[in-house]
């Protein structure tokens, strides 16, 4: 559980890759210790185990780093997919040859045969690395989308009041009422007039905070103190004593929203 929470806190692909390789390195040494002492009846040799790690897994770790770098580079410069594939193929072949020459005493008897033997192993590792990268990057992208404000939303509503430009934050608005070619914006302190339409203003406000309840009304859900949607003339009781009508068209959607806990304020 603690490890999962720590994993969730990692925000970049590089951090996730480093965490996975670090965890694997620790497990590898634990396995070596267990094998030498309890199975083989020998003694755990730290240096020998690290050398074996570098020979057996060092190239794969390097492959991981190179692939992540290639993927990151491709995302940044939007390079051609064909170029990306060629770069990966050259890298894999180069690492296979490096693995052969690092342990030449074992693989050097027949370089071509050793290359053919090791190539599938590195291709599979490549696919696994890319698949893991895809999963991690999609989870990071999904998180980024959740944290990112909705596209086109404004941090404030700009109005011209008595010749002075003012900026109203959405949090200060109780409701917005259509008034011909204008809209009345009722805040916690006063009412402002702006030449605009309900539809246009709604498009620039957070949809999870503001809901249209009538052809002429857009309300801030946070300031609803009471409601009655069962009677024919359904209404919302807003903060400061305002009563807002609810039309039949918007009643079902509003009822679903108000049925969720912590949607509106009651005092």
Image (cartoon, rainbow, N blue to C red):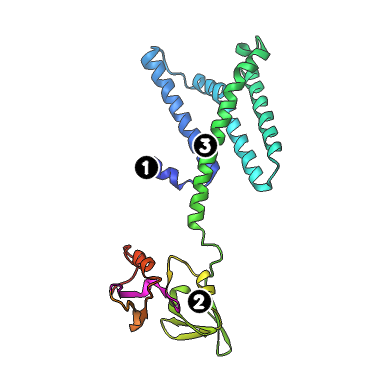
Q: Residue at x 48, y 57 (%)?
A: 147
Tell me the tag on residue 36: none
Chain-order first, disc 3 or disc 2: 3
Give how far apart the Cα atoms at labels 3 and 1 are.
21 Å
SS of the residue under disc 2: helix
Which region is colored magenta?
Answer: 214-230
Within the magenta stretch, is there residue 71?
A: no
Q: Residue at x 37, y 79 (%)?
A: 245
Compared with 74, 236 (above or below) is: below
Q: In front here: 206 or 172?
A: 206
SS of the residue under disc 1: helix
Residue 68 percent coordinates (x, y): 60, 38
Chain-order first, disc 3 or disc 1: 1
Mark 3 highlights which residue? 132
Quadrant showing the C terminus: bottom left
Q: Residue at x 31, y 64 (%)?
A: 259
In this orientation, does residue 3 appear?
A: yes
Residue 222 percent coordinates (x, y): 37, 71
Residue 108 percent coordinates (x, y): 65, 12
Residue 7 percent coordinates (x, y): 44, 43
Give how far apart the Cα atoms at labels 1 and 2 are.
48 Å
Residue closest to the far bottom: 162
Mark 1 highlights which residue? 2
Mark 2 highlights which residue? 198
Label 1 Cα neighbours within 10 Å, binned few <14 / some 14-19 / many ≥20:
few
Quadrant showing the N terminus: top left
Give how far apart the Cα atoms at labels 3 and 2 are.
46 Å
């Amino acid at each position: 559980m603690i490890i999962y929470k720590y994993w969730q806190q990692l925000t970049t692909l590089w951090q996730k890759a480093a965490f996975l390789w670090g965890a694997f390195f620790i497990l590898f040494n634990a396995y070596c210790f267990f094998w030498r002492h309890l199975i083989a009846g020998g003694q755990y040799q730290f240096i020998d185990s690290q050398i074996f790690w570098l020979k057996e897994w060092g190239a794969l770790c390097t492959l991981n780093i190179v692939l992540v770098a290639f993927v990151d580079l491709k995302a940044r410069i939007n390079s051609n997919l064909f170029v990306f594939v060629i770069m990966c193929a050259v890298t894999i072949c180069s690492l296979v040859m490096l693995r052969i020459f690092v342990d030449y005493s074992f693989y050097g008897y027949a370089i071509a045969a050793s290359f053919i033997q090791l190539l599938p192993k590195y291709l599979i590792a490549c696919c696994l690395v890319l698949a893991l990268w895809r999963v991690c990057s999609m989870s990071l992208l999904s998180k980024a989308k959740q944290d990112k404000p909705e596209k086109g939303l404004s941090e404030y509503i700009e109005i011209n009041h008595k010749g002075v430009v003012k900026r109203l934050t959405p949090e200060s608005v109780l409701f917005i009422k259509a008034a011909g070619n204008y809209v009345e914006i009722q805040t916690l302190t006063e009412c402002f007039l702006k030449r605009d339409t309900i539809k246009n203003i709604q498009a620039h406000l957070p949809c999870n905070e503001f809901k249209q309840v009538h052809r002429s009304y857009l309300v801030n859900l946070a300031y609803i103190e009471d409601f009655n949607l069962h009677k024919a003339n359904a209404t919302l009781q807003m903060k400061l004593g305002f009563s807002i009508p609810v039309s039949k068209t918007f009643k079902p959607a509003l009822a679903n929203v108000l049925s969720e806990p912590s949607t509106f304020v009651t005092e």
